[in-house]
Image (tube, rainbow, N blue to C red):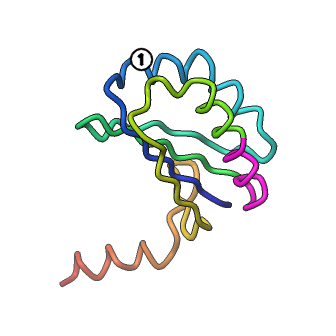
């Protein structure tokens, strides 16, 4: 899996979230290799999104989709987004088992 983190500065977090829900979610969720998408309010006018895709190629394609959407809806941004990306090294959800090495960490702390 591959993750893309985009950080945006805006003076209207509520408007951005509304527009993402209404206009962008269908774009990102229908992209090839889509796994999951998160939007985070970091406060102070900063909002981040985290997109998870099956491969680097899928994630890079999503960047093109996001860039196109932002170029058409950029009025709410104060500057260009910061974009970082990389391979997902650990992935744990409530539906996946906890890796064995993590379980052992808890045992050593409890016995110590």
- Residue 62, percent across and down? 70, 45
Snapshot quadrant of residue 41: top left
Look at the image and say whether residue 60 sits in the magenta stretch: yes
Residue 84 lies, in percent from the top left, at 52, 59
Identified at 52% across, 70% down, the residue is: 99
* Secondary element at tag 1: helix
- State left or right for residue 3 relative to residue 77: right
Task: Say which quarter of the image contains residue 87.
Answer: bottom right
Q: How many dots with numbers?
A: 1
Judged by its main secondary structure, the magenta piece is helix
Asked if residue 79 lies in the magenta stretch, the reply is: no
Depth check, front residue: 104 or 18: 18
Q: Which residue has dot 1 on it?
A: 15
53 shown above or below 98: above
The stretch in magenta equals 54-64
In the displayed structure, would residue 50 be above or below residue 47? below
- Between 112 and 16, the residue placed more toward the observer is 16
């Amino acid at each position: 899996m591959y993750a893309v983190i985009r950080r945006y500065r805006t003076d209207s977090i509520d408007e951005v979230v509304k527009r993402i829900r209404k206009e962008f979610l269908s774009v990102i969720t229908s992209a090839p290799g889509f796994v999951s998408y998160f939007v985070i309010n970091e406060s102070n006018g900063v909002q981040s999104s985290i997109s998870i895709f099956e491969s680097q190629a899928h994630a890079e394609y999503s960047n093109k989709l996001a860039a196109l959407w932002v170029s058409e809806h950029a009025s709410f941004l104060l500057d260009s987004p910061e974009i970082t990306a990389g391979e997902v090294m650990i992935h744990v959800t409530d539906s996946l088992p906890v890796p064995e090495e993590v379980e052992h960490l808890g045992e050593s702390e409890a016995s110590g």
